[in-house]
Image (cartoon, grey):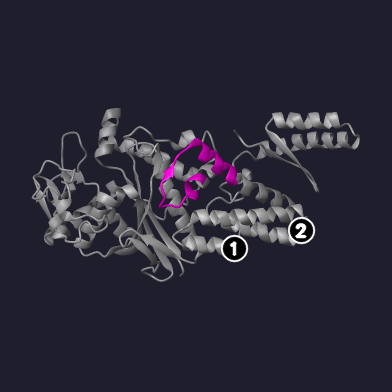
Amino acid sequence: MSLTLYDTAAGAMRPFEPVTPGRASIYLCGATVQSAPHIGHIRSSVTFDILRRWMAERGLDVTFVRNVTDIDDKILAKSAEAGVPWWQWALINERAFADAYDALGCLPATYEPRASGHVPEMIALMQRLIDGGHAYASGGDVYFAVASFPPYGSLSGQNLADMRPAADSGSGAKRDPRDFALWKGTRPGEPSWQTPWGPGRPGWHLECSVMATKYCGTEFDIHGGGLDLVFPHHENEIAQSQAAGDPFARYWMHNSWVTMAGEKMSKSLGNSLGIDHLLEQVRPVELRYYLGAAHYRSTMEFSEQALQEAAAGYRRIESFVDRAAERVGAGEPKGIMCADFTTALDDDLGVPQALAALHNEVSQANQLLADEAPDAAIRGVLASVRHMADILGIDPLSPTWSRSGDGDTRYREVADALIADLLEQRNNARRERDFARADAIRETLHGLGIEVEDTPRGPRWTLAEAH
């Protein structure tokens, strides 16, 4: 394969060479379901959804695992504050994340395991670490002995001697302040599971090691997540997995943040933008376009203007696809992709350059429509545009985004009939040289948010862009 990816662990671009030829395994750190998702969370999902689609396009059989952290300190605190059981609070927010993934057209995960469902595997991993001298029990807690793993800090580029104490102490006594909790002993009012070291609940990091290896294998291809997870979460995953003898992930990929006023978007800062709120301003496919348009390793500074510009960019693709499909039929999204598009995605998932290539193709295709090119030429370029858009998850005629698939087909048919009647009245007025009446009809449609375009094949209408 010609695909190259930036590997955080290597600090460099590396050619992608899967563990098993013809297959690719991706483990993405999913949601900690303490509250509803914001666009910072969903950017990660869109990024890795595009990677998954591109790998499948390149002929790989992809296993895609996205976990759900449904038990941790923040969930317990939030649920107690709300006065509901922890599992109920977690489930409510897990469903909100699932709705957001679906709304933005992310493909379903191959597996989507919950942390609370994998406690037996966690107990087994802790026993392996204790037997190997890499972990110890203390007062009902179980800690990983950081000093027992010399490579610790290599992912994040830190020196062990300079590290601060781990901020996850339980009731037990640590041998080293930098040691991190694998397991936390039971506390009043908290859920607990029985272990050989007493009742308790998982620490944050342990879950991903056991779920990644269970569903992807002890050595797998790509571990992904947000840049904020590099330390301590992913650093700790590497330590506890490799110390137990598992090779773990070959490549580490991290998407950067979405910021507001220069600050990373987070619930603790109170500057989060929820998915539901943004979907009142733009359509789901337009929000997906926005979140996927920047390179995944670049920081996105959120602004309303940038969101609307992204929506307009998508509508330019949609406009061509609709016009071409009206003329030659929808066909299938399986045309020839332009070389610039494939080169861009093979180069560390270069979506900005891929989108530029797609828009260039659309511009040329619009000229073909204007020149009344043969139907065969229009059909070919439509298939090409749809193919590239489909890989990015934004094909306007896909079942996910097609107007005929959104449950409003009957309303669309009624609107088509009524507008067609008004357009026919306008045509009659123009033939009779009653231009005042023709202009009045056009203004009436404009007032309803409908733009009319006169083409060699007759007038066509579209909904005006929202402002």
Q: Marks 2 and 1: CB-CB under 8 Å?
A: no
Quarter of the image with the C terminus in it: top right
Picture quadrant of residue 404? top right
- Residue 338 has which mark? 1
Q: Measured from the top left, where is residue 309 in percent x and y?
A: 55, 41
Say which residue label 2 marks.
Answer: 373
The tally of labels here is 2
Mark 2 or mark 1: whose residue is earlier in sequence = 1
* SS class, disc 2: loop
Residue 441 located within the stretch drawn in magenta: no
Q: Residues within 10 Å of mark 1 (few under 14, many from 20)?
A: some
User: Residue at point 62% right, 62% down?
Assistant: 335
State left or right for residue 314 relative to residue 207.
Answer: right
Residue under the image location 15 percent in, 57 percent down: 127
Q: Position of residue 121 (x, y in %)?
A: 24, 55
| Helix, strand or loop for disc 1 | loop
One can see residue 331 in this view: no
Q: Which amino acid does label 2 sit on?
A: Ala
Q: How far apart are marks 2 and 1 (CA)?
A: 20 Å
Instruction: State the extent of the magenta-drawn residues as a range.
Output: 290-314
